Image (tube, rainbow, N blue to C red):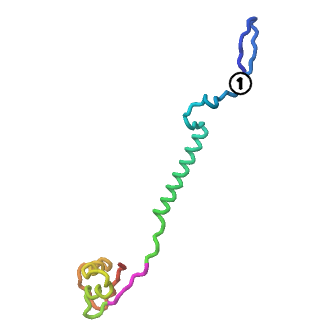
Amino acid sequence: MSALTWDEVGVVESTPRRHLTLVPTGDGVAAGGLQLTRRGRLAITLVVLALAVIAAVVGVNRAFAAPAPAAPLATVTVASGDTLSTIAAREMPGLPIREAVQRLQIANNLNSAAISAGASIVIPSY
């Protein structure tokens, strides 16, 4: 494009429009820091948005990932005269008897401490 001006006689002269602007250097530059163009701000915004989407996808994948397969649980067949306390003391020696009995009841869905001979009892890991 060019700028149009009127001359004294009324003739229109065409002067070329400058496309470049002078940028001060040295002492004329204010210490304002970094200035980004519109395209630069857009690029940074898109990079940050892409990183946020990637982080969200990775987080969702971890949340819905299949759990690690559980170790097979040990089972014990109840002998005649066995109680939950004797089984707890024999199979879970590192725990107090009361806590071991409670874990046995929870693992086997028992409402009471009564068990019958020949029943199969699951021993939970501790």
* Residue drawn at the location 65% of the way across and 29% of the way down: 23
91 relative to 35, above or below: below
Image coords of residue 9 (percent x, y): 76, 5
Determine if the magenta segment contains residue 72: yes
Residue 100: name its quadrant. bottom left
Kindly state the secondary structure of the residue where label 1 is placed. loop
Image coords of residue 79 (percent x, y): 30, 93
Magenta residues, start to end: 71-77
* Residue drawn at the location 32% of the way across and 84% of the way down: 92
Q: In this view, does 16 lie to the left or right of 90?
A: right
Q: Is residue 71 left or right of residue 85?
A: right
Which one is nearer the viewer's eye here, 60 or 40?
40
Determine if the magenta segment contains residue 108: no
**Residue at label 1?**
18
Q: Quadrant of the C terminus?
A: bottom left
Residue 77: name its quadrant. bottom left
* Residue drawn at the location 31% of the way across and 85% of the way down: 93
Q: Quadrant of the N terminus?
A: top right
Q: Which residue lies furthest to the top in this view?
A: 9
Image coords of residue 80 (percent x, y): 27, 94
Image coords of residue 52 (percent x, y): 51, 51
Q: Which residue lies furthest to the front in this view?
A: 27
Which one is nearer the viewer's eye here, 20 or 62?
20
Crowdedness near tag 1: few (<14), some (14–19) or many (≥20) residues, C-alpha within 10 Å:
few
Tell me which amino acid carries mark 1.
Answer: Arg
